[in-house]
Amino acid sequence: MAGFSELIKSFEKTRDYIRDFFIYGFKVRGDFARMSGRTYDDEKRRAESWLGDVLRSDDSVRGRQISISVDCGHIFENPLCQAYGAKSFTDNDIRLHMLLLDLLADGQTRTLNEIVDALLADYDAEFEPQTVRGKLKEYTAEGLLLTEKRGKTAYYRRAAETAQDYFAKYDGLADAVRFFSLDERFGEIGAGLLRSTGLKNDIFLRKHHYLVHTLEDILLPELIAAAEQKRAVRLRTFSAKARDKADSEGGTFLAVPMQILSSVQTGRRYLAAYLPEQKRFHSFRLDFIRTVKAAEPVSNFDKIAAAYRRNLGRVFGVSFAMRRDTGSVEPMRLTFRADPEREAFIIGRLEREKRGGTLECTGEGLYTLTVDAFDPNEVMHWAKTLIGRIVSVEGGNAAAREKFFRDIRRMQRMYGGGARQ
Protein backbone atom coordinates (compact mmCIF):
# COMPACT_ATOMS: atom_id res chain seq x y z
CA MET A 1 0.00 0.00 0.00
CA ALA A 2 1.35 3.42 -0.96
CA GLY A 3 2.33 5.60 1.99
CA PHE A 4 1.26 9.17 2.65
CA SER A 5 3.37 11.93 1.06
CA GLU A 6 3.31 15.69 1.60
CA LEU A 7 4.22 16.22 -2.08
CA ILE A 8 1.49 17.02 -4.57
CA LYS A 9 0.86 16.15 -8.22
CA SER A 10 -2.07 18.45 -8.94
CA PHE A 11 -1.97 22.01 -7.62
CA GLU A 12 -5.59 22.46 -8.75
CA LYS A 13 -6.73 19.85 -6.24
CA THR A 14 -4.60 21.30 -3.45
CA ARG A 15 -5.89 24.78 -4.23
CA ASP A 16 -9.47 23.52 -3.92
CA TYR A 17 -8.86 21.93 -0.53
CA ILE A 18 -7.01 24.85 1.01
CA ARG A 19 -9.60 27.31 -0.24
CA ASP A 20 -12.65 25.30 0.80
CA PHE A 21 -11.24 23.99 4.06
CA PHE A 22 -9.22 26.74 5.56
CA ILE A 23 -10.30 29.99 3.93
CA TYR A 24 -14.05 29.64 3.51
CA GLY A 25 -13.80 27.28 6.46
CA PHE A 26 -16.43 26.02 8.87
CA LYS A 27 -16.65 22.69 7.06
CA VAL A 28 -16.58 19.18 8.42
CA ARG A 29 -15.68 15.86 6.85
CA GLY A 30 -19.27 15.13 5.79
CA ASP A 31 -19.46 18.35 3.76
CA PHE A 32 -17.15 16.93 1.07
CA ALA A 33 -19.13 14.47 -1.01
CA ARG A 34 -17.02 14.80 -4.14
CA MET A 35 -14.21 12.51 -2.94
CA SER A 36 -13.62 9.36 -0.90
CA GLY A 37 -12.91 9.52 2.80
CA ARG A 38 -9.34 8.32 2.21
CA THR A 39 -8.67 11.07 -0.33
CA TYR A 40 -10.20 13.64 1.99
CA ASP A 41 -7.97 12.55 4.90
CA ASP A 42 -4.80 12.59 2.80
CA GLU A 43 -5.44 16.05 1.36
CA LYS A 44 -6.38 17.42 4.77
CA ARG A 45 -3.21 16.05 6.37
CA ARG A 46 -1.12 17.40 3.50
CA ALA A 47 -2.48 20.93 3.92
CA GLU A 48 -2.19 20.74 7.71
CA SER A 49 1.52 19.89 7.38
CA TRP A 50 2.09 23.27 5.69
CA LEU A 51 -0.34 25.35 7.75
CA GLY A 52 -0.09 23.81 11.21
CA ASP A 53 0.94 27.05 12.95
CA VAL A 54 -2.05 29.04 11.72
CA LEU A 55 -4.86 26.46 11.94
CA ARG A 56 -7.79 26.60 14.30
CA SER A 57 -10.22 23.76 15.02
CA ASP A 58 -13.66 24.04 16.59
CA ASP A 59 -15.85 21.14 17.66
CA SER A 60 -19.56 21.35 16.93
CA VAL A 61 -22.51 18.99 16.76
CA ARG A 62 -21.70 18.49 13.06
CA GLY A 63 -18.07 17.54 13.72
CA ARG A 64 -14.69 19.23 13.85
CA GLN A 65 -14.40 22.40 11.77
CA ILE A 66 -10.95 23.55 10.67
CA SER A 67 -10.02 26.97 9.32
CA ILE A 68 -7.13 29.42 9.11
CA SER A 69 -6.98 31.86 11.99
CA VAL A 70 -4.29 34.48 11.57
CA ASP A 71 -3.83 38.21 12.07
CA CYS A 72 -2.39 39.17 8.69
CA GLY A 73 -0.88 42.32 10.16
CA HIS A 74 1.32 40.30 12.52
CA ILE A 75 2.89 37.63 10.30
CA PHE A 76 6.14 38.01 8.38
CA GLU A 77 5.49 35.25 5.83
CA ASN A 78 2.41 34.12 3.94
CA PRO A 79 1.90 30.46 4.96
CA LEU A 80 0.01 29.66 1.73
CA CYS A 81 3.20 30.20 -0.30
CA GLN A 82 4.47 26.87 1.00
CA ALA A 83 1.96 25.06 -1.22
CA TYR A 84 3.92 26.12 -4.32
CA GLY A 85 7.06 24.37 -3.06
CA ALA A 86 5.50 20.94 -2.52
CA LYS A 87 5.76 19.55 -6.04
CA SER A 88 6.10 15.79 -6.45
CA PHE A 89 9.00 14.13 -8.26
CA THR A 90 10.20 10.62 -9.05
CA ASP A 91 13.47 9.02 -8.00
CA ASN A 92 14.63 9.38 -11.60
CA ASP A 93 13.78 13.11 -11.57
CA ILE A 94 15.85 13.91 -8.51
CA ARG A 95 18.76 11.75 -9.67
CA LEU A 96 18.90 13.45 -13.07
CA HIS A 97 18.59 16.87 -11.39
CA MET A 98 21.62 16.30 -9.16
CA LEU A 99 23.77 14.77 -11.90
CA LEU A 100 22.96 17.49 -14.46
CA LEU A 101 23.82 20.35 -12.14
CA ASP A 102 27.03 18.63 -11.05
CA LEU A 103 28.08 17.87 -14.64
CA LEU A 104 27.49 21.44 -15.80
CA ALA A 105 29.03 23.05 -12.71
CA ASP A 106 32.34 23.54 -14.58
CA GLY A 107 30.72 26.22 -16.78
CA GLN A 108 31.48 24.40 -20.02
CA THR A 109 28.94 24.30 -22.88
CA ARG A 110 27.76 20.91 -24.10
CA THR A 111 25.31 19.55 -26.64
CA LEU A 112 22.53 17.15 -25.73
CA ASN A 113 24.48 14.15 -27.02
CA GLU A 114 27.59 15.21 -25.12
CA ILE A 115 25.58 15.51 -21.92
CA VAL A 116 24.00 12.07 -22.38
CA ASP A 117 27.41 10.51 -23.06
CA ALA A 118 29.01 12.27 -20.06
CA LEU A 119 26.24 11.10 -17.72
CA LEU A 120 26.98 7.53 -18.74
CA ALA A 121 30.79 7.84 -18.72
CA ASP A 122 31.26 9.93 -15.57
CA TYR A 123 28.33 8.78 -13.41
CA ASP A 124 27.41 5.41 -14.87
CA ALA A 125 23.88 6.80 -15.33
CA GLU A 126 22.00 5.91 -18.49
CA PHE A 127 19.14 8.22 -19.51
CA GLU A 128 17.11 8.38 -22.70
CA PRO A 129 18.04 11.47 -24.79
CA GLN A 130 14.39 12.50 -24.87
CA THR A 131 14.26 12.52 -21.05
CA VAL A 132 17.40 14.65 -20.80
CA ARG A 133 16.16 17.01 -23.55
CA GLY A 134 12.94 17.62 -21.62
CA LYS A 135 14.82 18.38 -18.41
CA LEU A 136 17.23 20.73 -20.21
CA LYS A 137 14.29 22.60 -21.76
CA GLU A 138 12.59 22.88 -18.38
CA TYR A 139 15.71 24.22 -16.65
CA THR A 140 16.39 26.68 -19.47
CA ALA A 141 12.88 28.11 -19.05
CA GLU A 142 13.44 28.42 -15.30
CA GLY A 143 16.81 30.17 -15.74
CA LEU A 144 18.98 27.43 -14.24
CA LEU A 145 20.63 26.81 -17.61
CA LEU A 146 21.54 29.01 -20.57
CA THR A 147 21.35 27.85 -24.18
CA GLU A 148 22.77 29.11 -27.45
CA LYS A 149 22.37 27.89 -31.01
CA ARG A 150 25.37 27.15 -33.22
CA GLY A 151 23.89 26.36 -36.56
CA LYS A 152 21.15 23.85 -35.85
CA THR A 153 22.75 22.49 -32.69
CA ALA A 154 21.82 23.76 -29.20
CA TYR A 155 24.56 24.11 -26.57
CA TYR A 156 23.79 24.21 -22.85
CA ARG A 157 25.67 25.58 -19.86
CA ARG A 158 24.84 26.30 -16.27
CA ALA A 159 23.88 29.89 -15.39
CA ALA A 160 26.91 31.55 -13.84
CA GLU A 161 25.13 33.44 -11.06
CA THR A 162 22.65 32.27 -8.46
CA ALA A 163 20.26 34.16 -6.20
CA GLN A 164 22.88 34.07 -3.44
CA ASP A 165 25.39 35.69 -5.79
CA TYR A 166 22.99 38.50 -6.62
CA PHE A 167 22.16 39.08 -2.95
CA ALA A 168 25.86 39.38 -2.18
CA LYS A 169 26.54 41.59 -5.21
CA TYR A 170 23.75 44.14 -4.76
CA ASP A 171 23.38 45.74 -1.36
CA GLY A 172 19.75 45.90 -0.23
CA LEU A 173 18.47 43.39 -2.80
CA ALA A 174 17.70 40.80 -0.11
CA ASP A 175 15.58 43.36 1.76
CA ALA A 176 13.75 44.21 -1.47
CA VAL A 177 12.92 40.52 -1.94
CA ARG A 178 11.76 40.32 1.70
CA PHE A 179 9.38 43.20 1.00
CA PHE A 180 8.23 41.67 -2.30
CA SER A 181 7.45 38.35 -0.58
CA LEU A 182 4.42 40.03 1.06
CA ASP A 183 3.07 41.44 -2.19
CA GLU A 184 -0.44 40.40 -3.16
CA ARG A 185 0.63 39.70 -6.74
CA PHE A 186 3.13 36.88 -7.20
CA GLY A 187 4.44 37.25 -3.66
CA GLU A 188 5.19 33.53 -3.73
CA ILE A 189 8.11 34.32 -6.07
CA GLY A 190 9.76 36.43 -3.41
CA ALA A 191 8.91 33.85 -0.76
CA GLY A 192 10.41 31.12 -2.94
CA LEU A 193 13.66 33.08 -3.41
CA LEU A 194 13.96 33.55 0.34
CA ARG A 195 13.24 29.89 0.97
CA SER A 196 15.80 28.71 -1.62
CA THR A 197 18.55 30.89 -0.11
CA GLY A 198 17.77 30.16 3.53
CA LEU A 199 16.65 33.72 4.27
CA LYS A 200 13.57 34.88 6.16
CA ASN A 201 11.56 38.06 6.21
CA ASP A 202 12.00 39.49 9.70
CA ILE A 203 11.62 43.16 8.79
CA PHE A 204 8.35 43.91 7.00
CA LEU A 205 4.72 43.51 7.98
CA ARG A 206 1.65 44.41 5.94
CA LYS A 207 -1.46 45.68 7.68
CA HIS A 208 -3.94 44.70 4.95
CA HIS A 209 -2.72 41.43 3.48
CA TYR A 210 -5.14 39.28 1.46
CA LEU A 211 -3.54 35.85 1.85
CA VAL A 212 -6.08 34.11 -0.39
CA HIS A 213 -4.76 35.88 -3.49
CA THR A 214 -1.70 33.64 -3.36
CA LEU A 215 -3.80 30.68 -4.49
CA GLU A 216 -5.13 32.66 -7.47
CA ASP A 217 -1.70 33.62 -8.80
CA ILE A 218 -1.38 30.26 -10.54
CA LEU A 219 -4.01 31.53 -13.02
CA LEU A 220 -2.53 34.95 -13.75
CA PRO A 221 0.38 34.11 -16.11
CA GLU A 222 -1.95 32.41 -18.61
CA LEU A 223 -4.52 35.22 -18.41
CA ILE A 224 -1.94 37.99 -18.77
CA ALA A 225 -0.20 36.21 -21.64
CA ALA A 226 -3.52 35.74 -23.46
CA ALA A 227 -4.32 39.46 -23.17
CA GLU A 228 -0.85 40.41 -24.44
CA GLN A 229 -1.09 37.92 -27.32
CA LYS A 230 -4.67 39.01 -28.14
CA ARG A 231 -6.09 35.52 -27.85
CA ALA A 232 -9.04 33.93 -26.07
CA VAL A 233 -8.94 31.43 -23.20
CA ARG A 234 -11.19 28.62 -22.06
CA LEU A 235 -12.19 28.96 -18.42
CA ARG A 236 -13.52 26.19 -16.24
CA THR A 237 -15.38 27.64 -13.28
CA PHE A 238 -17.62 26.44 -10.48
CA SER A 239 -20.54 27.84 -8.54
CA ALA A 240 -20.11 28.92 -4.94
CA LYS A 241 -23.31 27.04 -4.07
CA ALA A 242 -22.44 23.81 -5.87
CA ARG A 243 -18.72 23.37 -5.29
CA ASP A 244 -19.16 20.65 -2.64
CA LYS A 245 -21.40 18.42 -4.74
CA ALA A 246 -19.91 15.26 -6.17
CA ASP A 247 -21.20 16.06 -9.69
CA SER A 248 -20.19 19.71 -9.62
CA GLU A 249 -18.05 20.27 -12.70
CA GLY A 250 -18.85 23.94 -13.05
CA GLY A 251 -19.25 25.89 -16.27
CA THR A 252 -16.97 26.29 -19.28
CA PHE A 253 -16.60 29.65 -21.01
CA LEU A 254 -14.76 30.95 -24.05
CA ALA A 255 -13.52 34.35 -22.88
CA VAL A 256 -11.28 37.16 -24.13
CA PRO A 257 -9.30 38.52 -21.13
CA MET A 258 -9.31 42.28 -20.75
CA GLN A 259 -8.08 43.18 -17.28
CA ILE A 260 -7.67 41.98 -13.67
CA LEU A 261 -9.91 44.04 -11.39
CA SER A 262 -9.68 44.38 -7.60
CA SER A 263 -12.71 45.28 -5.52
CA VAL A 264 -11.93 48.08 -3.09
CA GLN A 265 -14.90 46.96 -0.97
CA THR A 266 -14.18 43.26 -0.56
CA GLY A 267 -10.54 42.86 -1.62
CA ARG A 268 -11.50 40.10 -4.06
CA ARG A 269 -9.96 39.95 -7.51
CA TYR A 270 -11.85 39.45 -10.76
CA LEU A 271 -11.12 38.75 -14.40
CA ALA A 272 -12.91 41.19 -16.70
CA ALA A 273 -13.47 39.45 -20.02
CA TYR A 274 -15.55 39.51 -23.19
CA LEU A 275 -17.73 36.47 -23.90
CA PRO A 276 -17.99 36.12 -27.72
CA GLU A 277 -20.75 33.51 -27.58
CA GLN A 278 -22.94 35.78 -25.43
CA LYS A 279 -21.68 39.05 -26.95
CA ARG A 280 -21.20 40.81 -23.64
CA PHE A 281 -18.62 41.62 -20.98
CA HIS A 282 -18.53 39.72 -17.72
CA SER A 283 -16.40 39.55 -14.57
CA PHE A 284 -15.30 36.23 -13.02
CA ARG A 285 -14.09 35.91 -9.45
CA LEU A 286 -10.59 34.50 -9.66
CA ASP A 287 -11.13 32.17 -6.72
CA PHE A 288 -14.07 30.61 -8.62
CA ILE A 289 -11.95 29.78 -11.69
CA ARG A 290 -10.63 26.22 -11.73
CA THR A 291 -8.44 26.19 -14.85
CA VAL A 292 -7.34 28.43 -17.73
CA LYS A 293 -6.30 27.13 -21.14
CA ALA A 294 -5.14 29.19 -24.11
CA ALA A 295 -7.47 29.25 -27.11
CA GLU A 296 -7.42 30.77 -30.59
CA PRO A 297 -6.27 34.34 -31.46
CA VAL A 298 -9.00 37.00 -31.62
CA SER A 299 -8.96 38.95 -34.90
CA ASN A 300 -11.05 41.87 -33.59
CA PHE A 301 -9.29 42.13 -30.20
CA ASP A 302 -8.54 45.86 -30.57
CA LYS A 303 -12.20 46.61 -31.30
CA ILE A 304 -13.29 44.61 -28.23
CA ALA A 305 -10.68 46.37 -26.07
CA ALA A 306 -11.95 49.79 -27.20
CA ALA A 307 -15.53 48.79 -26.32
CA TYR A 308 -14.32 47.55 -22.93
CA ARG A 309 -12.70 50.90 -22.15
CA ARG A 310 -15.96 52.67 -23.02
CA ASN A 311 -17.93 50.29 -20.79
CA LEU A 312 -15.63 50.84 -17.80
CA GLY A 313 -17.13 54.30 -17.33
CA ARG A 314 -20.42 52.64 -16.31
CA VAL A 315 -18.96 49.98 -14.02
CA PHE A 316 -19.27 51.20 -10.44
CA GLY A 317 -17.50 48.18 -8.94
CA VAL A 318 -16.67 45.10 -10.98
CA SER A 319 -20.08 44.08 -12.36
CA PHE A 320 -21.20 44.58 -15.95
CA ALA A 321 -24.65 43.20 -15.05
CA MET A 322 -26.94 41.77 -17.74
CA ARG A 323 -29.09 44.21 -19.66
CA ARG A 324 -31.70 41.57 -20.45
CA ASP A 325 -32.27 41.27 -16.67
CA THR A 326 -32.20 44.95 -15.74
CA GLY A 327 -33.59 46.49 -18.92
CA SER A 328 -33.05 50.16 -19.63
CA VAL A 329 -31.77 51.70 -16.39
CA GLU A 330 -31.88 55.42 -15.75
CA PRO A 331 -29.10 57.08 -13.72
CA MET A 332 -29.37 56.62 -9.96
CA ARG A 333 -29.60 59.74 -7.79
CA LEU A 334 -28.60 59.48 -4.13
CA THR A 335 -28.96 62.48 -1.84
CA PHE A 336 -26.88 62.63 1.35
CA ARG A 337 -26.95 65.05 4.30
CA ALA A 338 -23.66 66.54 5.54
CA ASP A 339 -22.72 69.75 7.35
CA PRO A 340 -20.23 71.57 5.08
CA GLU A 341 -18.53 73.24 8.05
CA ARG A 342 -18.27 70.42 10.60
CA GLU A 343 -18.39 67.41 8.25
CA ALA A 344 -16.20 68.41 5.34
CA PHE A 345 -14.62 64.95 5.54
CA ILE A 346 -17.94 63.38 4.48
CA ILE A 347 -18.17 65.65 1.45
CA GLY A 348 -14.55 64.83 0.68
CA ARG A 349 -15.32 61.13 0.83
CA LEU A 350 -18.28 61.52 -1.54
CA GLU A 351 -16.08 63.40 -3.98
CA ARG A 352 -13.29 60.84 -3.66
CA GLU A 353 -15.49 57.75 -3.99
CA LYS A 354 -17.98 58.94 -6.62
CA ARG A 355 -16.02 57.05 -9.29
CA GLY A 356 -17.80 57.73 -12.60
CA GLY A 357 -20.59 59.78 -10.99
CA THR A 358 -21.15 63.51 -10.52
CA LEU A 359 -21.59 65.23 -7.14
CA GLU A 360 -23.41 68.54 -6.65
CA CYS A 361 -24.81 70.56 -3.79
CA THR A 362 -28.60 70.55 -4.14
CA GLY A 363 -29.61 72.35 -0.96
CA GLU A 364 -28.45 73.46 2.44
CA GLY A 365 -26.40 70.52 3.73
CA LEU A 366 -27.66 68.28 0.89
CA TYR A 367 -25.41 66.66 -1.71
CA THR A 368 -26.71 64.59 -4.63
CA LEU A 369 -24.60 61.94 -6.34
CA THR A 370 -25.73 60.93 -9.84
CA VAL A 371 -24.35 57.62 -11.10
CA ASP A 372 -25.10 55.96 -14.45
CA ALA A 373 -23.98 52.39 -13.67
CA PHE A 374 -24.66 49.03 -15.32
CA ASP A 375 -25.43 47.44 -11.94
CA PRO A 376 -27.38 49.69 -9.53
CA ASN A 377 -26.98 47.07 -6.80
CA GLU A 378 -23.27 47.86 -6.58
CA VAL A 379 -24.10 51.52 -6.04
CA MET A 380 -26.48 50.60 -3.23
CA HIS A 381 -23.95 48.33 -1.53
CA TRP A 382 -21.60 51.30 -1.34
CA ALA A 383 -24.35 53.74 -0.30
CA LYS A 384 -25.16 51.59 2.75
CA THR A 385 -21.80 52.56 4.24
CA LEU A 386 -23.36 56.04 4.62
CA ILE A 387 -26.70 54.72 5.81
CA GLY A 388 -27.42 57.40 8.42
CA ARG A 389 -26.93 60.20 5.90
CA ILE A 390 -29.12 58.99 3.03
CA VAL A 391 -32.03 61.38 2.43
CA SER A 392 -33.48 59.92 -0.79
CA VAL A 393 -32.87 57.25 -3.43
CA GLU A 394 -34.18 57.80 -6.95
CA GLY A 395 -33.63 56.31 -10.37
CA GLY A 396 -31.81 53.05 -11.01
CA ASN A 397 -34.25 50.18 -11.28
CA ALA A 398 -37.22 49.33 -9.09
CA ALA A 399 -35.70 46.05 -7.86
CA ALA A 400 -32.55 47.76 -6.50
CA ARG A 401 -34.58 50.47 -4.76
CA GLU A 402 -37.04 47.99 -3.25
CA LYS A 403 -34.22 45.82 -1.96
CA PHE A 404 -32.69 48.83 -0.24
CA PHE A 405 -35.98 49.86 1.40
CA ARG A 406 -36.71 46.25 2.37
CA ASP A 407 -33.34 46.04 4.12
CA ILE A 408 -34.09 49.27 5.96
CA ARG A 409 -37.43 47.90 7.16
CA ARG A 410 -35.74 44.72 8.35
CA MET A 411 -33.18 46.74 10.29
CA GLN A 412 -36.00 48.77 11.82
CA ARG A 413 -37.69 45.59 13.03
CA MET A 414 -34.44 44.14 14.34
CA TYR A 415 -32.94 47.19 16.04
CA GLY A 416 -35.58 49.88 16.14
CA GLY A 417 -38.41 48.04 17.90
CA GLY A 418 -41.56 46.32 16.76
CA ALA A 419 -42.31 42.64 16.17
CA ARG A 420 -39.74 40.56 14.38
CA GLN A 421 -40.63 38.65 11.24
Image (cartoon, rainbow, N blue to C red):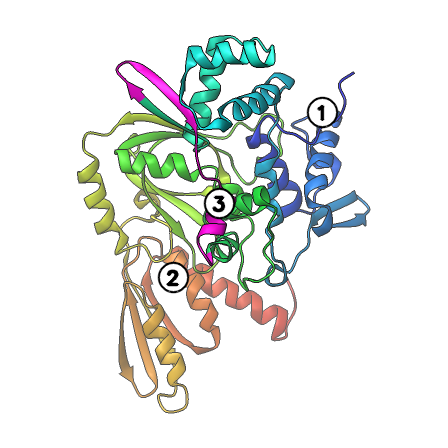
Q: Which residue is mark 3?
A: 165
Question: How far separated are the C-alphas under marks 3 and 2?
Answer: 52 Å
Residue beneath disc 2? 379
N-term mark: 1 or 2: 1
Residue 50 x/y as whole percent: 68, 42
**What number is the disc on residue 315?**
none
Amino acid type at circle 2 is Val
Inspect the image, locate mark 1, and give the three-letter code of the amino acid beneath it.
Ser
Q: Which residues are magenta?
A: 149-172
Given residues 360 and 205, the one toward you in this image is 205
Judge left or right: residue 324 versus residue 100.
left
| Residue at the image point whose x is 68% and y is 38% from the top | 47
> CA gap, disc 3 to disc 1?
47 Å
Q: Is residue 369 above or below residue 20?
A: below
Callout 2: helix, strand or loop? helix
Between label 3 and label 2, give the one nearer the viewer.
3
Label 3 crowd (10 A; few <14 / some 14-19 / many >=20): few
Image coordinates of residue 82 in percent, x first then y, are 61, 42
Q: Which residue is mark 1?
A: 36
Q: Is residue 178 left or right of residue 32?
A: left
Q: Mark 2 Cα within 10 Å, few/some/many (few <14, many 20+)?
A: many
| Rendering coords of residue 101 (x, y %) | 53, 26
